[in-house]
Amino acid sequence: MAANSSALVSVEQYLNTAYEVDCDYVDDQIEERNVGEGGMSRVIRRLRDFVAMGVPHVWIIDPADRVAMVLTEQGIRLQHDGLLVAPEISLSSDLAERFAALER
């Protein structure tokens, strides 16, 4: 069963906020889903702390599924190919090259 937050937000406010993997918007309230404290949920929560401290980009690379997740202040997104880019520090990484290296 989900625990209800006491904060009410408008639909407009909700639609203009970053998506939280473990929250739902139900009946004008944000509800946290019980996703447990194991595995990726704990990792994402910890990495959000780094973003809150000012780290602009966090890359989470899943070599088994050949996918990357990019975590920023705007939220989290999946990236299957192309370049991971952190322009603030002139850093990029080609996902195809990274995943191809696993096959060697």
Image (spheres, helix red, strand yellow):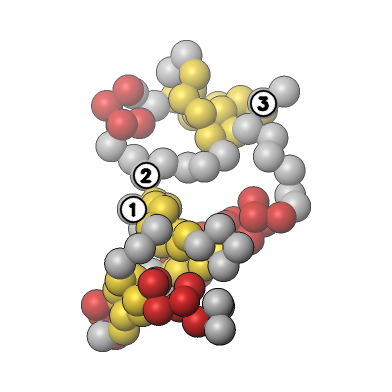
Q: Position of residue 72 (x, y in %)?
A: 38, 61
Please indicate whether residue 36 sits to the left or right of residue 52 in the image.
right
| CA separation in Å, label 1 and label 3 | 24 Å
Q: Residue at x 47, y 14 (%)?
A: 27
- Mark 1 lies on residue: 74
- Mark 3 lies on residue: 2
Q: Are marks 2 and 1 in contact (CB under 8 Å)?
A: yes
Nearer the N terminus, badge 3 or badge 2? 3
Amino acid at the residue labelled 2:
Ala
Q: Secondary structure at mark 2?
A: loop
Amino acid at the residue labelled 1:
Gln
Please indicate whether residue 31 sits to the left or right of residue 70 in the image.
right
The residue at the far top in this view is 27
Q: Position of residue 60 (x, y in %)?
A: 51, 66
Amino acid at the residue labelled 3:
Ala
- Mark 2 lies on residue: 18
Q: Position of residue 30 (x, y in %)?
A: 50, 28
Structural crowding at the residue carrying mark 1, measured as other residues with C-alpha within 10 Å and reported as few (<14), some (14–19) or many (≥20): few
- Counting the numbered discs, the total is 3
Q: Which mark is residue 97?
A: none
Image quarter hosting the C terminus: bottom right
Q: Residue at x 31, y 84 (%)?
A: 91
Nearer the N terminus, badge 2 or badge 1? 2
Q: Quadrant of residue 15?
A: top left
Nearer the N terminus, badge 1 or badge 3? 3
State the residue in front, 55 or 79. Answer: 79
Q: Are marks 3 and 2 in contact (CB under 8 Å)?
A: no
